[in-house]
Amino acid sequence: MPRRKITVELEPMLGAFAAVSVVGSPEDRILDAAAQLMRTYGLKRWSMEDVAELAAIGRTSVYRAFSTRDELVHAVLARELRGTIGHIVAAASRSGSVEDGIIEGAIAGLAVLRSSLVEQLLRSDPSTILPFLTTKAGPLIAITRQFLVAQASAVGAAISNEHAEELAEIAARLGLSFVLTRETVFPVEDEDALRASLRRVLRPVLSPLFATDAAGL
């Protein structure tokens, strides 16, 4: 039976983005099963019953946690986004400077994208996913920017909020560009060479911000 086309929108992801499932909980198992089905079949050729069977959870329990396929899909994508940002922030927080943090965060983000669910869905369901990442991507960039700024503040980054927002937006837009177009002159397969390349490109952009912050402005 043909299934109604799912439309990926920002608003349903907002609540799901804030919800964190406990590892091993029924909700987490449902999300794992749905993510596996989405990787295998895209957004169309699976049902809530398939999710229940794969998760080894009763169909009623699946519907109690997620009332529709749309809600479940948005929850899976929100978890994917949260996990990607979490990897970026973790890598950046281990660095000794803002510059190193941006570079290590970018490398961590690229590593996650190579095996991401979004990467798979861009191939299987481009007409559904592309608008969310292109013409309707403004709110997605805003969410990512806000999350990165909050995390930077939490780890004690010594830059102003204004500059943190600028750097976070640069990071969000660069990351999105690599999601959409993987071909690049950057040596993405060689981490050491990529670090050197990113440092060479980013330092002229970042150095005025560091100088301003150092001056206490």
Image (cartoon, helix red, strand yellow):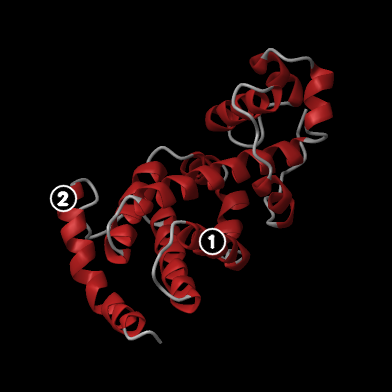
Quadrant for residue 95, please give it: bottom left
Q: Nearer the viewer, mark 2 or mark 1?
A: 1
Q: Position of residue 206 (x, y in %)?
A: 30, 75
- 88 left or right of 99 in image: right
Q: Nearer the viewer, residue 44 or 145?
A: 145
Rendering quarter of residue 11:
bottom right
Which residue is depicted at the point 41% across and 45% down?
Answer: 113
The percent position of residue 126, horizontal first and vertical second, equals 55, 49
Dot 1: within a 10 Å radius of its alpha carbon, few (fewer than 14), some, or many (20 or more) residues? some
> How far apart are the two marked residues, 2 and 1, measured between alpha carbons?
28 Å
Of 213 and 200, nearer the camera is 213
Q: How many marks?
A: 2
Q: Can you tell which mark lies on residue 55?
A: none
Name which quarter of the figure residue 125 lies in: top right
Residue where numbered disc 2 is placed:
192
Asked if residue 128 is positioned above or below residue 144 in the image, the reply reads: above
168, 188: nearer the viewer: 168
10 Å neighbourhood of mark 2: few (<14), some, or many (≥20)?
Answer: few
Asked which secondary structure carries label 2, the reply is helix
Q: Considering the image in quadrants, where does the N terminus appear?
A: top right
Q: Amino acid at mark 2?
A: Asp
- Under circle 1, the secondary element is helix
Residue 104 location (% of width, % of height): 30, 53
Query: Which tag, 2 or 1, sits closer to the chain's start?
Result: 1
* Quarter placement of the C terminus: bottom left
Q: Position of residue 153 (x, y in %)?
A: 49, 63
Question: Relative to the observer, which residue lies in front, 149 or 192?
Answer: 149
Q: Which mark is residue 150?
A: 1
**In the visual, does 91 lie left or right of 79?**
left
**In the image, what residue occupies the spot 62% across and 24% down?**
33
For badge 1, the amino acid type reads: Ala
Q: Can you say whether 62 is above or below 20 in the image?
A: above
